[in-house]
Amino acid sequence: MRYLSFLLGVLLLAAVGLFACKKEASRPNILFILADDWSYPYASIYGDKSVKTPNLDRLAEHGTVFTNAYCASPSCTPSRAAMLTGRYPHNLGEGVNLCGRLQHSVPTYVQILEKEGYAVAFDRKGWAPGDYTKMGYTNNPAGDSAKLGFKPFLDQLPKGRPFFFWFGTNDPHRPFDLDNGKKTGIDLQKIRVPAFLPDVPEVRGDVADYLSEVERFDREIGDLLKTLEESGQLNNTIIVVTSDNGMPFPHAKANLYDYGTRVPLLISRFSDNQEQPKRHDSFVNLIDLTPTFLDWAGIKEQPNMDGLSLVPVLDGQRTLHRSEVFLERERHCLCRAEFDYGAGYPMRAIRTNDYLYIRNFRPDRMPAGDETIPGTPSIFGDVDGGPTKVYMMDHRNDAVVKPLFALGFNKRPAEEFYVVKDDPYNLHNQANNPQYAPMKKELQERLAMWMKAENDPRQNGGGDQIDKYESTTHAWITRTGIIFWD
């Protein structure tokens, strides 16, 4: 009888262990590949012929390419914080600003996945820029640092344990290697210079250097795929590729125009064995990644989030994800004298298939930052320094450059309204055009309703406390680069 009881106990333990193993095996690994300042449509998967991205092409053969993905905020720290939490940046307190504080008490998918048994780590740029030690964190909010890289991380991973790995490249963030685009074979004549920039050799070369970093990013994706294949983990790994915000040029990064907020997004899984690449055109906000990651991990009890899981769309249960996205921006760099250099440029926007409506809540301020601030090296500090910025500043009174300089650097009205189909570069503000008055009013009301529902601090003219939030680290943006001062 004792032997029978012992045997039943052994069988029960074995069954429990087998169930646990099956549960572990059924949970996919997730490789999150995050570029830095990479705008849509700079990849061959979007039809751009000036840049070669064969590894993205390969991923697209096994996944879904999203054509209307947007970051929550066109600034590194709040965008990354929003992706980590699934919340709009204004719901993150001091985390809404560049170098702001993401409080440890706010749940992140990293905390949740680790609690559920995932190994979570990151390489290179995780949550940044900022000092996470001032926020209650002992490690970067993106996970433990895998200083030796992805392969050593996989080599030491216990067999059967699922992982989430964040690979955060610094490409294609400035500074660029001067003339590297030309040196690496990018044909400067094939480049489509965005219409908000002057089409001159200096700018064309700068864009080529930017694209050379996109191509380097693609080569590193190839290295990551090779590592996955050699480890035998490829078929049980979901691969997500996107960017934190748009390209570091005037009228792009740190703005709610499309080239500041619209980013590539590709989700692939080689085990799906799909025959044709899929494209999905409904809107995605990158806050949607957190609930998606948690759903893939099978986590039922999830914190309150603003994001919506992409799993129903990816699984074919739904055809529409979002019909619009809401976008926001507060303080990017310290580049205005008010509030002891803390004054930002608060904006909110709604982007639909046909229109982009933007509210500028402090139109008396300079959107690109003050040209100079006495006692500091800051020069138009919300525009990254480099050859394009230098050229536009030096030629601001030239007939061709003058209107483009105004778009990127000068003050703006309280309302902006763009007909995206006719104006993909958001050049012609139609806010005062009577033809679009009914649609502008509708979007104005929808944006106001969203702000009210979200308890946005900027509704009804408020939100000055946001300008008073301190930065955890500091830097000045100059004509050509950046100067750190702490």
Image: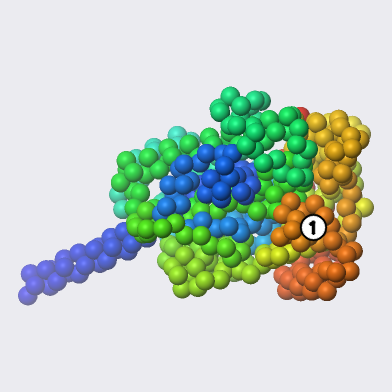
The residue lying toward the viewer, choosing from 124 and 192, is 192
Q: As drawn, is 178 to the left or to the right of 142?
A: right
Q: Position of residue 440 (x, y in %)?
A: 82, 69
Looking at the image, which residue is at 61% across and 69% down?
Answer: 322
From this view, report whether residue 311 is shown above or below residue 43: below
Q: Which residue carries the number 1 mark?
A: 347
Spot occupied by residue 114 in the image (x, y as percentages of width and height): 46, 55
In this orientation, does residue 139 appear? no
For the N terminus, the quadrant is bottom left
Q: Nearer the viewer, residue 49 or 242?
A: 49
Mark 1, secondary structure of its residue: strand
102 left or right, relative to 164: right
Please, is residue 134 above or below residue 486 in the view? Answer: below
Q: Position of residue 102 (x, y in %)?
A: 65, 53
Residue 140 placement, left or right of 343: left
Q: Is residue 422 above or below residue 33?
A: below
Identify residue type, mark 1: Met
Crowding near pointer 1: few (<14 within 10 Å), some, many (20+)?
Answer: many
Residue beneath the point at 56% across and 39% down: 51
